[in-house]
Image (cartoon, rainbow, N blue to C red):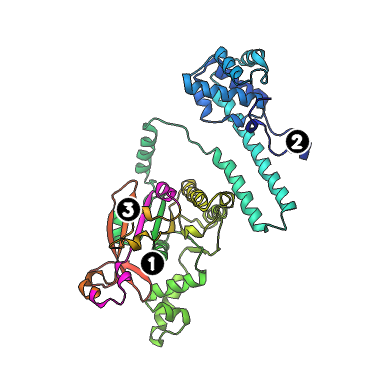
């Protein structure tokens, strides 16, 4: 047969596994093809819902593939053109010849039901792929338990299942009046989602009020710039205001994060808090803030080398169980995407970036993804970072709704008394560079850096931290 191998379904013989034919609807498949033959304009509508591989019958897949080609080239095509194209591909006889094409047309009563038939085909396809994903998981659990851990097999299974869900996550086009009416109704009922403030006044002003639902925010810097400290500070400020926050720490333990937060709140030296060696006169402050911190809705998960599928599952649980409305991932380069890792690290980072972006939209909440920058900034005069310094994948720059770069020039001149004396305004000051913002301006805002507690605070020229 000359029908492309990719149309031969299913990959796993689930019929043999369960003693019955996998989910399919031959009548709906014929309904799709017949509708498109009667009214070629339906091809474009159907192609928005399904692709050729959605058909269970490989003949139907080959016929629809030819229809899509005709539609792309001629904006339509009749039965004669379709038969001619299939013949040129040496596939006409394989699909049953012209007689079968006539049979498909005769079996179709009206053509305007094409999208309805296509949705049935799409649903059956999703069920088959779900069965395939489950069968592959069963096979791996039986045969690869000696080479893969249960966690690795589970993460791979989650990615396969989520891939099934993602494929059908399409929205239909609407007239502009539809989203406008929705926005107007939300404004009247005060249900319009408001940005979530970061707690840093100048940054919130630059961001138009804070972080918006469904957005992916990349917070990037070179090591030791304080990117984890800023991410934790934002999470702390948001949780302190009463919004539940999920914080995924892939580098620091939750004990280390708790210690750092206690230092930030009490303003006691981080090393002293960590080692419980602070002076007795600070004990009351530490105890007071310990009690306050215990009550804020900050949920921490400190799993190392987390897979994107595991992140997705954890965020869903946090949303369902704790009402989480804001998420921080610290940091992106420590995540994995096992299914993409086989190709290259760049491909894997791209998959992670796309996964975080999709998760933000799906869950309807902002996600800050902390990221490393490459060494280019350190070799540049002034050391100021750029978006092009984002490490390992240009997809981060493309996927992010907002890119924030962090820079502390003082760090590069530690111990240089001449520079410190010549630049007193740079001491204890950090630049937060909003390098990209889809719905707002770019620019630089200043934050104060408190090295004693490794914390950022609102900036004041007098360096009096608020």
Provide residue 363's location: percent of width, then percent of height: 49, 49
Q: How many other residues sit within 10 Å of disc 3, few (<14), some (14-19) or many (≥20)?
A: some
Please name the residue that numbered disc 1 is placed on. Answer: 226
Write the residue at 62% across / 51% down: 156
Q: Are marks 1 and 3 in contact (CB under 8 Å)?
A: no
Q: Nearer the viewer, residue 55 or 273?
A: 55
Q: Is residue 226 left or right of residue 425?
A: right
Q: Which residues are magenta?
A: 393-418
Provide residue 174's location: percent of width, then percent of height: 42, 31
Write the residue at 47% across / 21% down: 73
Label 1: which secondary element = loop
Give the mark nearer the N terminus: 1 vs 3: 1
Q: How many other residues sit within 10 Å of disc 2, few (<14), some (14-19) or many (≥20)?
A: few
Please name the residue that numbered disc 3 is placed on. Answer: 435
Q: Is residue 101 above or below residue 306?
A: above
Q: How many other residues sit within 10 Å of disc 1, few (<14), some (14-19) or many (≥20)?
A: many
Report how far apart the C-alphas of labels 3 and 2 lie in the structure. Answer: 54 Å
Q: Are marks 2 and 1 in contact (CB under 8 Å)?
A: no
Label 2: which secondary element = helix
């Amino acid at each position: 047969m000359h029908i492309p191998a990719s149309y031969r379904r299913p990959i796993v013989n689930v019929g043999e596994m369960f003693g019955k034919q996998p989910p399919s609807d031959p009548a709906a498949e014929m309904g799709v093809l017949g509708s498109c033959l009667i009214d070629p304009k339906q091809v474009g509508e159907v192609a928005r819902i399904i692709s050729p591989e959605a058909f269970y019958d490989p003949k139907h897949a080959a016929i629809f593939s030819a229809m899509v080609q005709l539609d792309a080239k001629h904006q339509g095509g009749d039965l004669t053109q379709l038969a001619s194209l299939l013949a040129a591909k040496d596939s006409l006889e394989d699909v049953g010849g012209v007689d079968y094409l006539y049979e498909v047309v005769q079996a179709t009563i009206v053509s305007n039901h094409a999208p309805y038939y296509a949705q049935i085909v799409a649903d059956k396809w999703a069920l088959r792929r779900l069965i395939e994903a489950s069968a592959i998981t069963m096979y791996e659990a039986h045969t690869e338990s000696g080479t893969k851990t249960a966690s690795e097999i589970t993460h791979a299974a989650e990615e396969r299942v989520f891939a099934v869900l993602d494929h059908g996550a399409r929205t239909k086009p609407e007239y502009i009046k539809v989203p406008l009416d929705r926005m107007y109704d939300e404004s009247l009922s005060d249900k319009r989602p408001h940005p979530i403030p970061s707690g840093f006044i100048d940054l919130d002003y630059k961001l138009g009020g804070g972080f918006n639902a469904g957005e992916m925010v990349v917070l990037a810097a070179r090591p030791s710039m304080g990117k984890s400290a800023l991410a934790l500070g934002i999470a702390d400020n948001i949780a302190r205001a009463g919004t539940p926050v999920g914080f995924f720490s892939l580098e620091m333990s939750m004990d280390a994060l708790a210690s750092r937060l206690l230092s930030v709140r009490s303003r006691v030296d981080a090393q002293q808090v960590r080692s419980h060696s602070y002076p007795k006169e600070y004990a009351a402050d530490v105890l007071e803030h310990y009690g306050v911190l215990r009550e804020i809705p900050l949920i921490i998960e400190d799993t190392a080398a987390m897979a994107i599928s595991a992140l997705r599952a954890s965020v869903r649980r946090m949303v369902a169980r704790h009402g989480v409305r804001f998420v921080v991932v610290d940091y992106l380069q420590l995540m994995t995407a096992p299914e993409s890792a086989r190709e290259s690290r760049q491909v894997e980072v791209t998959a992670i970036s796309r996964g975080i972006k999709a998760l933000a939209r799906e869950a309807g909440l902002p996600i800050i993804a902390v990221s490393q920058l490459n060494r280019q900034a350190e070799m540049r005069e002034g050391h100021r970072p750029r978006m092009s310094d984002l490490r390992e994948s240009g997809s981060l720059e493309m996927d992010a709704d907002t890119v924030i770069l962090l820079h502390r020039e003082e760090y590069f001149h530690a111990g240089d008394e001449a520079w410190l004396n010549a630049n007193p305004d740079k001491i204890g000051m950090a630049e937060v560079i909003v390098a990209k913002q889809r719905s707002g301006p770019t620019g630089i805002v200043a934050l104060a850096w408190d090295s004693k507690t490794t914390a950022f605070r609102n900036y004041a020229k007098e360096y009096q931290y608020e």
